[in-house]
Image: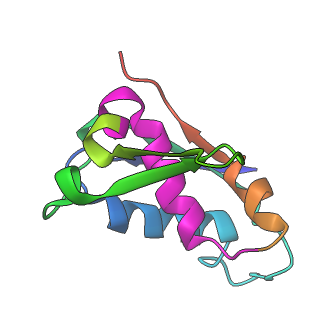
């Protein structure tokens, strides 16, 4: 299994997530098959230094649902990013992968290194 190491320092979140999604699917290889996982581990470093453009820090909202009536909780991008920047990247990559059974298998191959 091959490993790709990506340094997220100063890179826009969306561009970084697209590159990771392409690598996890294996679309960069000539033997790409949509029904296979891809077989590449992607290691991301310096996630806390990723660049956010526009007003996303104050306007973007992440929602969680407990399944109970009135159980919708919301947090701003800045709150989530300050606490767990890994969750922001995982959410962005998940949104760019195809919605099928392989999505969870592909996300397991995404490794985010803790800084410091």
Q: Please give the range of residues in magenta.
A: 80-99
Residue 61 in the image: x percent, y percent? 35, 55
Side of 88 relative to 24 (left or right): left
Residue located farthest toward the top when viewing the structure as drawn: 116
Side of 79 relative to 22 (left or right): left
Residue located farthest toward the front when viewing the structure as drawn: 69
Within the magenta stretch, is there residue 5?
no
Within the magenta stretch, is there residue 87?
yes
The image quarter in which residue 22 lies: bottom right
The residue under the point 26% across, 41% down is 78
Asked if residue 37 can be seen in this view, the reply is no
Q: Out of 68 and 34, give the one closest to the viewer.
A: 68
Q: Out of 86 and 16, give the one closest to the viewer.
A: 86
Examine the rendered structure and indicate whether residue 57 appears above or below residue 115.
Answer: below
The residue under the point 59% across, 77% down is 28
Asked if residue 86 can be seen in this view, the reply is yes
């Amino acid at each position: 299994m091959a490993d790709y190491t990506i340094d997220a320092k100063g890179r826009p979140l969306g561009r970084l997530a697209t590159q990771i999604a392409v690598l996890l699917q294996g679309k960069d290889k000539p033997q790409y098959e949509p029904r296979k996982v891809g077989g590449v581990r992607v290691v991301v470093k310096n996630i806390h230094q990723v660049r956010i453009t526009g007003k996303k820090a104050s306007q973007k909202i992440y929602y969680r649902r407990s399944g109970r009536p009135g159980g919708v909780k919301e947090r701003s991008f800045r709150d989530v990013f300050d606490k767990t920047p890994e969750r922001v990247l995982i959410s962005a990559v998940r949104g760019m992968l195809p919605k099928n059974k392989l999505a969870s298998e592909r996300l397991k191959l995404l490794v985010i290194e803790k800084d410091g």
